[in-house]
Amino acid sequence: MSIDITVIGSTNLDITATVPRLPGPGETLLGETLTHSPGGKGANQALAASRAGASVRFVSAVGTDAAADQALALLKADGVDLGDLLLDPALPTGTALIAVDAAGENNIIVIPGANAALGAQAVTSRAAAIEGVVVLQGEIPAGGIAAAVASAKGRVVLNLAPVIEVPREVVLAADPLIVNEHEGELTLAQLGVEPAGLDEEAVVAALRAQGVASVVMTLGSRGALVSDGAGTTQVPSVAVSAVDATGAGDAFVGALAARLAAGASLVEAAGFAARFAADTVTRPGAQSSYPEKGAVSVDA
């Protein structure tokens, strides 16, 4: 099978508690429900890209525990190529502890587990499997990200979330770099530019001035800023009634990569990704909220 996208990244089992509001420091709240579901930024983006119509290979690391079966279930069902997974018997599958409030906002704690094994050596040994558009995030070791960039034969989509310290050349290889407002500021600081006092457009412009080919800054319900050689464009989102924002950013990344692989422009891809991500927040969960193939139109 020809592969459009290779996602190299994390796999987690999400343990989600719904709460009336997010707790403050030192506070104990009574929760309402508790669920276990597939997650991890890499796995989320791989499923989103597949649901957005791309053929996807996912390179990740999981334990040999029961959690791995749960975490990979939707990817397997969707036909994502999992032939290059690293199975680590010494580490548990990654876990994310998520609290979601009544407004759909969340906070997340990630325990990497086996994701920490996806370093430079593991990725380099799978270099032959890396083809098409290459999608990366910050939930695996920096060495693994750098090795993936070095092995990439096509376009690199880097979602530096969370923002971890990576070599400058890794950030500059991104086309696009996808960040939210906070991640954009942290990435700019990592490149040696003080972001204090800069608004969103100025942060995007400064990232481009450092040599990043293109930048997409996600703005939640306000859509996204897209900047490349053609200029900077505000891409609107879609007004929806939010239930749970978990995994929406990953849905955006995966959907955008799928449209880039199909030949869309960056602005077109971001517009589709904004609609795709908005659809996901109307349902609970991360991967479980992603629309089926064809449910979101590629036309605005």
Image (spheres, rainbow, N blue to C red):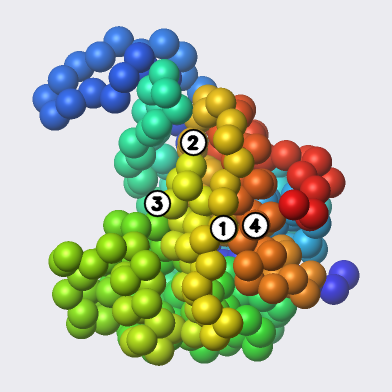
Secondary structure under tag 4 reads helix
C-alpha distance separating marks 1 and 2 = 19 Å
- Asked whether the viewer can see residue 24, the reply is yes
Q: Tell me the residue at 17%/75% (across/down).
A: 194
Q: Quadrant of residue 180?
A: bottom left
| Total tally of numbered discs in the picture | 4
Instruction: Say if 122 sits above or below 109 in the image.
Output: below
168 to the left or right of 248? left
- Asked whether the viewer can see residue 39, the reply is no
Q: Name the mark nearer the viewer: 2 or 4.
A: 4
Residue located beneath label 1 in the image: 235
C-alpha distance separating marks 3 and 2 = 24 Å
Residue located beneath label 3 in the image: 113
* Position in image of residue 144 (x %, y %): 45, 75
The amino acid type found where label 1 is placed reads: Val
Is 264 or 113 nearer to us in this picture? 264
The answer to whether mark 1 and mark 4 are in CB contact below 8 A is: yes
The amino acid type found where label 2 is placed reads: Ala
Q: Tell me the residue at 32%/71% (across/down).
A: 202
Secondary structure under tag 1 reads strand
C-alpha distance separating marks 1 and 4 = 6 Å
Q: Name the mark nearer the viewer: 4 or 3.
A: 4
Residue 245: mark: 2
